[in-house]
Amino acid sequence: MIVQLLPVLLIVGGIFFDLATPATYTASPLFAASPMVAAPFFSPWYTLLAGIGAIAAEAGLQMYNGTFTEIPSITELLTVVTVAGLALFINRVVRRGSARLASARVVAEAAQRAVLPSPAERIGGLQIAARYEAAQADAFIGGDLYAVQDTPYGVRLVVGDVRGKGLNAVETVAIVLGAFREAAEQEPLLEGVAQRLERALGREGTRRSGLDVFEGFTTAVLAEIPRGDGHVRVVNRGHPPPLVLHTDGMLVVLEPSVPALPLGMGGLGTWPDRVDEAAFPAGATLLLYTDGLSEARDAHGVFYDPRERLGGRIFPGPEELLDAVVADVLRHTGGASTDDMALLAVSRPEERRPKRRRTMPVVPHRDGT
């Protein structure tokens, strides 16, 4: 509200200043500031009115003081006129840039939805929630990725983080997700899915030039939740470990039994992928995330520790869990995150016990039957 009134206040303040001070003092800087303040924030009409008001105030005070024909007064009036014209030009440039930025936002949001579509709320009998939080406002897409797919082998998931930013990272995200969706349907073992992703990134590396050929990689964690089995299987490729939150508040960290290199680094050596298995009973929630969560820092440089912050807490479902995590990270960082954050939460619904059927008591007839 104050910003909207500021151009008017500058003109009114300039008039009072001129009337209350000797003729040697001038209020022309205040009049010139009025349209300049309006230019980046308001419409062309508002900026034009601020300019006209400033010119009228300057000219009216000069006529009131009887200095309208003096050289210093003419110079001051021309200065206000020039600044008003410049303010209109700046307003036009700002509005044109805003229109381009709005168009870029729409394109970026469409690209994100195409590359990272939001998964359904229920897949394979599991409750699903996903979130992508960009570190910078209006930055919709980056190198973080997630996907959920119902397959003949159970529900399979992937969360990953591509090294780097920009178009190359987005392209790699598309390659990883495309390879995952195909491999998840065809490979009977989770290790086979990881190897298919490794080969896909290897093919991508051979066609790239420069630094990405040698240093391009993607940290990722793959998970599989078989049907009718209270367990989750995990393959971790250099990624932050997933968490399992139980209904009693207990938190289990799914640390890999054997550390492994990220995807895309097969040129340094080949090792068999190791699948780790953990309990995933009814009511539990599996949380997968990228390092934008675990490396979020507060004003003192202290990292956000999801194990410490989430342990002992109980959440009704995956959506509520992600809402709480995002809000907690914002409080921890003061809203100054430096890296994108992808979150994927999967809950196994608790089994509903069948209701006992009420039976009517048998009342004997009067004849005893």
Image (cartoon, rainbow, N blue to C red):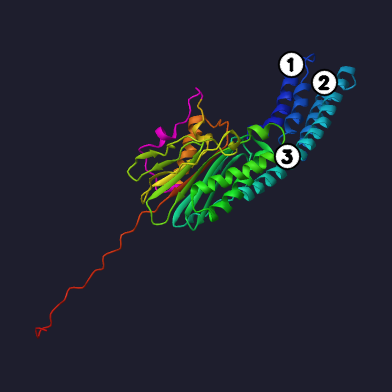
Image location (x, y in percent) of residue 35? 76, 31
Residue 202: give x, y in percent of width and height. Answer: 63, 41
Q: Which residue is mark 3?
A: 98
Image quadrant where residue 29 sits:
top right
Residue 21 — which label? 1
Q: Nearer the viewer, residue 297 or 223?
A: 223
Indicate which disc, 2 or 1, sits on the residue closer to the N terminus. 1
- Quadrant of the image containing the C terminus: bottom left
Q: Which residues are magenta?
A: 299-318
Helix, strand, or loop for circle 2? helix
Which numbered tag is attached to residue 65?
A: 2
Cα distance between the residues tagged 2 and 1: 12 Å
Residue sitting at x 84%, y 21%: 76
Tell me which secondary structure the magenta stretch mostly adopts: loop
Q: Nearer the viewer, mark 1 or mark 3?
A: 3
Q: Is residue 9 left or right of residue 217?
A: right
Within the image, what quadrant is residue 199 found in?
A: top right
Quote the CA–CA distance across marks 2 and 3. 43 Å
